[in-house]
Image (cartoon, rainbow, N blue to C red):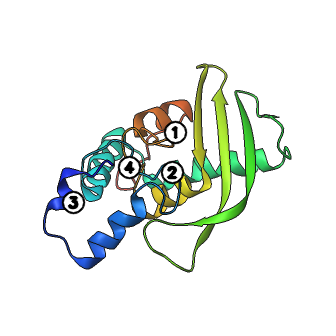
Amino acid sequence: MFTPNWFSMKQTPQEKKLYENFKPGKITKEGFLGDDIRHIHNIIEEDTHTVTRLGVSTQQIADRLQYFIEEGKKGLESVVDLGDYTTYVRWSRGMLPSPFSDPKRLYHKIVATVVNKKLQKELKYTQLNVHMIRDHGFFEGRGSVFRLEPEEVVEVLEIFREESSDSE
């Protein structure tokens, strides 16, 4: 079984519990880290740097991802045409907790597929992805089933740089 090299380092009980939540079989069959050997905090830090470099925010990304989920729900599990995009949402029974250990919050098992018709590129993600990006800046580890690369999300969903509020 795969264990990141950072897990052998001294950790607090909270960090050990957090890591356990991200492993395969705890919350999801595949887990959230894939074959990524970086510490969860390093994954978040690197993705945060990328998002900042792109001039967008995790809030913008999560809002845009959620928009396509909401539009896809209207299709009742059929493809919804949105002009330059199509979206398809598949629901499964049950709900999932966040691996970040918020026991009061559960997320529907929703998988969305969004296609940018102009670019002929697609993204596949979950409702849990939206939460993890919005609330924790976590795009999942490299090699995980639902890893979203920030650059790809910004490109495919055409998320534009935030306007600086201090430039007048």
Amino acid type shown at disc 4: Leu
Q: Which numbered disc covers residue 33?
A: 4
For mark 3, what is the residue?
A: 7
From the viewer's perspective, is residue 134 above or below residue 116?
below
Amino acid type shown at disc 1: Ile
Q: Which numbered disc covers residue 60?
A: 2
The local crowd at label 1, few if under 14, some if 14 to 19, many if 20 or more residues have their Cα within 10 Å, is some
Taking the image as shown, residue 43 lies to the left or right of residue 77, namely left
Q: CA distance from mark 2 to mark 3?
A: 32 Å
- Residue 163, position as x, y percentages in the image: 43, 47
Q: Residue at x 75, y 52 (%)?
A: 91
Q: Are marks 4 and 1 in contact (CB under 8 Å)?
A: no
Q: CA distance from mark 1 to mark 2?
A: 7 Å
Q: Residue at x 50, y 41 (%)?
A: 145
Q: Are marks 1 and 2 in contact (CB under 8 Å)?
A: yes
For mark 1, what is the residue?
A: 159
